[in-house]
Image (cartoon, grey):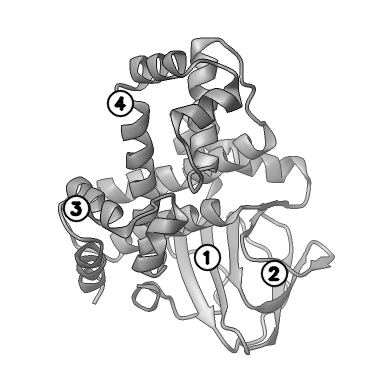
Amino acid sequence: MKKNLKSEFSTRQYMLSRDFEIYYYSDRSLPTVAAHTHNYYEFYFFIEGNIIMHIDGKSFVPTPGTMIVIPPSVPHFATLLNGDVAYRRLVFWVTSDFLQFLANISEDYLYLPNKADAANSFFIHKLNEIEFNTTQGKAFTLIDEINSKRFGRNAKILLSVSDFILSISRLVYESLNPYLAENDSDTLYQSLIQYIETHIDENLSLDILAEKFHISKFHISHVFTETNGLSLHKYIIKKRLEMCKDAILSGLDISAVSNSYGFSDYSVFYRAFVKEYGKSPKKYRDEIMRNNQ
């Protein structure tokens, strides 16, 4: 998957597209790239490698899961120390005009760009493993759609890029604004959703949630079903399958995915995946790969 979606690195530091561009790079050697600036925002996601990142006169070594938002006119470059481990990263470029277009729908699209602007330099945030795998999956879904010739391609690209921006914005916002477990139904529902998404690899039984939120199992079940339309159990299964799908798209081994996202038994995961997506995890992955050949 990653090989099919990988871009060849170029020293070009300007956009060919009017709105946005996204790249997945994996390199063991790099040409020298001097400090440079853009007239658009750069969202940088470090996956692995031995590098030093230089931004606005500051130098640091990123760790896997590091996300950096670099505003226009901020100088930056990376130094590759060695190629013992492939230097892998995702780079998303987006113009202010396109962000403003999205902001006409919701100001939430400007959350991360505004964070970077407010810092007068750049904004850096560390995503945990599950958050970062989810982000990679959404990025690869977008790249896959850009490279496709499917019906509805342009509409799906717009949906995918919107989902990508909002998803990472939500991850950061919720990390910086921890939930408050109150008894108000709307607040309780939102708190449940956030807790589930950030503890998806753990035991999420009603007993556990009732103990965590100090509320009866009946009340939690009632509030969730009334608000969501799905039972708590069905929602958790659906969310776990969605994250497993994203993890498969990000290149993780299929056999290891189910346990990482809370399925204790592979056969249970397999049956649920087929029921949700109409095909086995392997067939799902292989069809996406064929579409990129």
Q: CA distance from mark 1 to mark 2?
A: 18 Å
Q: Residues within 10 Å of mark 2 (few under 14, many from 20)?
A: few
Marks 1,4: beta carbons within 8 A: no
In the rendered image, which residue does mark 4 sit on? 230
Q: Which mark is residue 274?
A: 3
Q: Earlier in the sequence, mark 1 or mark 4?
A: 1
The image quadrant where one finds the N terminus is bottom left
In the depicted view, which residue is nearer to us: 219 or 292?
219
Disc 1 residue type (three-letter)? Leu
In the rendered image, which residue does mark 2 sit on? 36
Q: CA distance from mark 3 to mark 2?
A: 47 Å
Q: Nearer the viewer, mark 2 or mark 4?
A: 4
Under circle 1, the secondary element is: strand
Q: Earlier in the sequence, mark 1 or mark 2?
A: 2
The image quadrant where one finds the C terminus is bottom left
Q: Earlier in the sequence, mark 2 or mark 4?
A: 2
Under circle 3, the secondary element is: helix
34 w.r.t. 209: above or below = below
Give the farthest residue toward the top: 184
Q: Is residue 32 left or right of residue 106?
A: right
In the rendered image, which residue does mark 1 sit on? 90
Label tally: 4
Q: Is residue 213 left or right of residue 58?
A: left
Q: CA distance from mark 1 to mark 4?
A: 34 Å
Residue 126 occupies quadrant? bottom right
Q: Residues within 10 Å of mark 4 (few under 14, many from 20)?
A: some
Q: CA distance from mark 3 to mark 4?
A: 19 Å
Q: Residue at x 53, y 18 (%)?
A: 188
Q: Residue at x 41, y 43 (%)?
A: 163
Residue 51 in percent (x, y) is at 70, 77
In the depicted view, which residue is nearer to us: 128 or 40?
128
Q: CA distance from mark 2 to mark 4?
A: 49 Å
